[in-house]
Image (tube, helix red, strand yellow):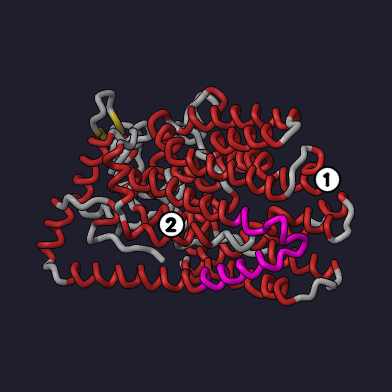
Amino acid sequence: MQSAGKSEEGSYDSKNVDVSAPVDADRGSTEDSANEDYGSSDDHIFSDPVVADRWRQIYEQARYENRHRFDPDCRWTAREETKLVRTIDWRIMIWAWVMFCSMDLHRRNINRAISDNMLEEIGMNTNDFNTGQTIFLLTFLAAELPSGLISKKLGADRWIPTLIVGWSIVAGSQAFVRGKSGYFVIKALLGLLMGGFIPDIVLWLTYFYKSTELPTRLAVFWTALSTTRHWFRGKNGWFTEREEYIMVNRLLRDDPSKGDMNNRQAVGLALLWKVLREWEMWPLYIIGLFVYIPPAPANTYLSYILRQMGFSVFQANLLAIPSQFIFAVNLLIITWVSKKFRERALVSSISNIWIFPWILALVVLPPDTNPWVRYALLTGLLSYPYCHAILVGWNAKNSNAVRTRAVSAALYNMFVQAGNIAGTNIYRDGDKPLYYKGNKALLAITSFNIVLFYLVKAFYVWRNRVRDAKWNAMTAEEREEYVLTTKDEGLRRLDFRFVH
């Protein structure tokens, strides 16, 4: 059987390319068995022609840009899919990593600058520094949702480059800062320009990776432009026609809702309000608010604390490297573990379980403790397994619709930034250099976070059981009627189950 190609009028025909039969199936047999998650299956959501026709109509109404590649009969081998994913990784993820590094460099280099007398040179103390960081985070937070809505209207391929150019110009202007006022202005502008970058890319990457692949790629961070053909990608683009069929159909079979909205479709105020009322997403927002507070103050002030303990500027900045390296390794490990066991809540709780003993030690150790011991504790604390990639992927999966995902990604990140604002102001000037009061507050928050993860898991288990009871009470005919006629959308559908 041949696939559904697309005619000039947008209708489907069967003349363009054969995508129903696997290519090189014998050669791919070994790899098929090695990776059971890859390769097409005859049993998928579009196996029922009635369901397939319903979704085809939805994709047409949404003017989904890849609808001409939608084909329920498309088949492919694990070898083909593995090759395609590697191509996406190589063509897309590396450039995303470069762009994210550009943003993070401008965002965090100030943490090292304060170890070299920057505060004294521009007439500030640590409370003034905290105020500047708070201004940055407030504008960062305020920009997230508006920037995400602009990106959804204009397209990420246009909006993200604009943001990058903007924050690069402003960051270069930091060389001319001579006082507190200039510092505050620069931080406000950087927050406004950087605020929309992360949720824009998080939404965009969901168009390329399946839900099981997403957290791992988020750990490295990547992005893509809106089309597969452009002048710098060659005449025929990055992907062959068959690869495009595989790419589109593997994503839609994993999550059909990824085609219910096109990439230039704006999100209106009514939809925004609707997403805000999706109360079953709020436990994830609450996690985002609290989970990253415990390591935030030490991460900001590590080099400064080391200087206060007697280390030189060079030593203070050099000694920050080990924790950053272990942090990166632990990030990849915890994300892999979550994917391996398909567990999000319990694995993510490891981040705060890791943090707890290090902060406890910082609270109970006497002031005359050897500086190297205190440095070792700070290094252990900041080497924690960062669960952000897991949580962002969790948020995207539970959104279950592009229109919901577009807003929920920004909302989640806004709660994260709100937590960062709180974390920025925990270490106060009167509590330095060992910040005993601040560390006691962080210990309490860490304990709360550990319990919170288990409560959120229990919440989603309960919500799934409620839906199971309603679904199982329906006859087969009622279920089919519901699937074809329901007005429920996204995570409100009775046939949707939350992941946890």
Residue at screen point 77% across, 40% down: 123
Q: Quadrant of the N terminus?
A: top left
On the picture, is 16 further left or further right than 431?
A: left
Q: Which mark is residue 285?
A: 2
Q: Mark 2 falls on what kind of element?
A: helix
The percent coordinates of residue 131 (x first, y second) are 63, 45
Quadrant of the snapshot with the C terminus: bottom left
Amino acid, disc 2: Tyr
Across and down, in percent, residue 304 comes to 78, 53
Q: Is residue 190 left or right of residue 301?
A: left
Mark 1 residue type = Asp
* Residue 195 to residue 392: above or below: above
Q: CA distance from mark 2 to mark 1?
A: 37 Å
Q: Which is more N-terminal, label 1 or label 2?
A: 1
Q: Residue at x 44, y 60 (%)?
A: 286
Residue at horizontal 29%, vertical 31%? 6
Residue 99 seen in this snapshot: yes
Residue 422: image location, x then y, percent: 56, 55
Range drawn in magenta: 423-450
* Magenta-colored stretch includes residue 74: no
Residue matched to label 1: 116
Q: Badge 2: few (under 14), some or many (20 or more) residues near its Cα, within 10 Å?
A: many
> Which is nearer the eye, 446 or 480?
446
